[in-house]
Amino acid sequence: ETGVTQTPRHLVMGMTNKKSLKCEQHLGHNAMYWYKQSAKKPLELMFVYSLEERVENNSVPSRFSPECPNSSHLFLHLHTLQPEDSALYLCASSQVGGTGPLHFGNGTRLTVT
Amino acid sequence: GENVEQHPSTLSVQEGDSAVIKCTYSDSASNYFPWYKQELGKGPQLIIDIRSNVGEKKDQRIAVTLNKTAKHFSLHITETQPEDSAVYFCAASQAGTALIFGKGTTLSVSS
């Protein structure tokens, strides 16, 4: 059982909808991440939050909006998405400072119709 | 920035054989190299990692080797079993930076 929980597991939304993905970690970590996983591509880092502050935004379109209200919770707000945004969205957490392993959730499979 | 290349993209072996997956990285400052296994419907799970002050690390049937001079590292799985079938990702990072992942290797172990 992973210490990082993502909901929902599956989401189908139209291009005009607004939805949110939720991530919660129970590992006492203080850094959280959103990754996008598409077929035939490497895991793409989207956002990094360290001590609840956004420290990295890898040129992600503004239709993706992250929110980190505390060190245990991370959201990804979605609006006016495109079909090419369909992918598996993975949340991960780690300890800040130095290098160390990421702990991933099982992801949200997003389909944009 | 860091770039990680991973080969092969697919690998098929017979049960009991060994499997080797190789990665190269571009940034000589990288000092942390984890390997992740992703099974269908799940997120990637850490299986082994190595830091730059070590050349080799082993955990039961899994081993990782690191060649800092050549900037490459490899995952070795011995005595493969059907449950080893999954997608494997290598990654690299340095202190204070996020992990950069390879494209993944789909390993199929047939019995």
Image (tube, coloured by chain):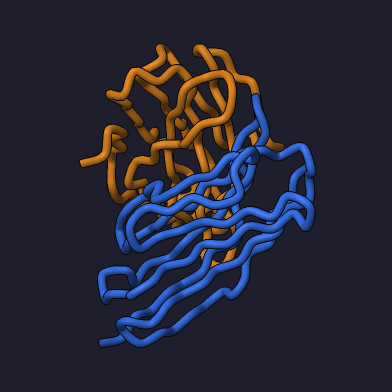
Chain colours: A orange, B blue
Image coordinates for residue A93, horizontal then vertical, percent: 43, 30
Residue B77 or A7: which is nearer the viewer?
B77
Q: Quadrant of the N terminus of chain B?
A: top right
Image coordinates for residue A39, horizontal then vertical, percent: 52, 65
Residue drawn at point x = 72 percent, y = 53 percent = B25
Viewed as shown, does residue A78 lie left or right of A55? Answer: left
Say above or below: B38 vs A55: below
Total labels: the figure holds 0
Image coordinates for residue B86, horizontal then vertical, percent: 37, 67
Residue drawn at point x = 57 percent, y = 74 percent = B9
Viewed as shown, does residue A56 lie left or right of B3? Answer: left
Residue B54 or B93: which is nearer the viewer?
B54
Instruction: Evaluate whether residue A13 shows in this view.
Output: no
Which residue of the protein is positioned furthest toward the left in this rendering? A1
Residue A17 or A26: which is nearer the viewer?
A26
Image coordinates for residue A13, horizontal then vertical, percent: 39, 49
Instruction: Evaluate whether residue A91 shows in this view.
Output: yes
Say above or below: A48 vs B78: above
Residue B21 quadrant: bottom right
Q: Quadrant of the C terminus of chain B?
A: bottom left
Say above or below: A110 vs A71: below
Residue drawn at point x = 36 percent, y = 50 percent = B43
